[in-house]
Image (cartoon, grey):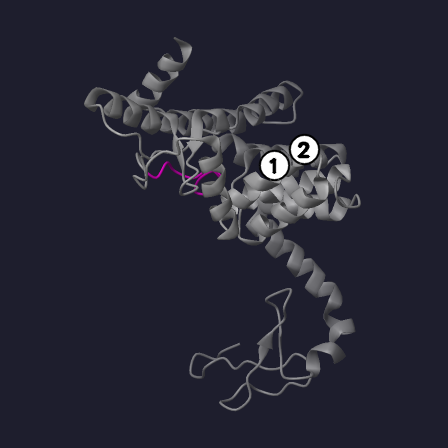
Amino acid sequence: MSDGNAVDKLCCASCGIEEVDDIKLKECDACDLVRYCSGCQREHKSQHEEACKKRAAELRDELLFRQPDSSHRGDCPICCLPMPLDRSKSTIMTCCSIVICDGCEHANQMREIEGKLQQTCPFCRKPTPSTVEEGDKQRMKRVEANDPVSMRNEGVDHYDKGDYSSAFECFTKSAELGDAEAHHSLALLYHKGHGVEKDRGKDIYHMEEAAIGGHPKARSNLAWHELKNDNIERAVKHLIVAATLGCDLSIKALMRMFKEGDVKKEVLAAALRAHQAAVDATKSPQREAAEQYRRT
């Protein structure tokens, strides 16, 4: 510790050498507790291992239970409002792999009809494919460009056809590019043993990565996992995060747990307010018009 007059010095946890200009210490890969000079980390492993695992778990939980700024669906790139969690209320554009809300797509369609304009993508303004084949070519170009959304959707197509190995490959590539939905899909493959051997550890890992990325369904799945292991507190934490993102299933689960005495009244009330705020944030006149149009 510093005495107030000197600068704290960094020292190797094994040999004690201080960090200077020509000696740089490297932080432990798994935790933020210690640093090592070249060659010392392996020698110190047995002494540090227990504390390292405990701190690594703490850091993982800090990341896991941090409230995401938004769901994995993000905002509509046109109206900038949060995307609905219901994927049926949005559309992916094959030309640019951009997902837009139904409100913006509907508004664009009305604009084109009223102005007798050529049909174009509301985002990049490229002409809408006139045939299925043309749309497939555009989609494959995005896959070849390693677009994570297109890669993940390609995986879904393979999965629906029963080609689990190809689906696993696509989901893996998409997950490596940071797609939370792909992490969720990978977790399900590991859980079911489709295209890969069943692996509970990898199932949970990818479910957690999806949850960290703002995936509410992944949060719900983790909550059920914790409940099975009688970890009520951790389950409630997951459900609160998901409910705050607007997840209906999670808020219903919290209400059931409140009736069973596992959730306090003030906790449920706060979750209900946060849930309603998230749902309200996704509403707009354009989206309501699109919903009404679908019903007619």
Which range is magenta?
69-77
Which quadrant of the view contains residue 83? top left
Disc 1 element? helix
Left/right of residue 167 with respect to residue 45 in the rendered view: left
- Give yes or no for residue 292 being in the magenta stretch: no
Give the image location of residue 96, x and y in percent: 40, 43
Q: Residue furthest bottom?
A: 22
Q: Is residue 138 visible?
A: yes
Q: For the view shown, which residue lies furthest in the left direction? A: 115
* Residue at mark 2: 161
Front: mark 1 or 2: 2
- Horizontally, residue 238 falls left or right of residue 92, namely right
Could you say where residue 217 lies in the image, as x and y percent from the top left?
Answer: 59, 33
Residue picked out by circle 1 = 156
Q: Amino acid at mark 1?
A: Val
Residue 128 placed where, x, y %?
36, 33
Residue drawn 19% across the image and 24% down it:
115
Q: Position of residue 105 (x, y in %)?
A: 34, 28
Residue 121: image quadrant is: top left
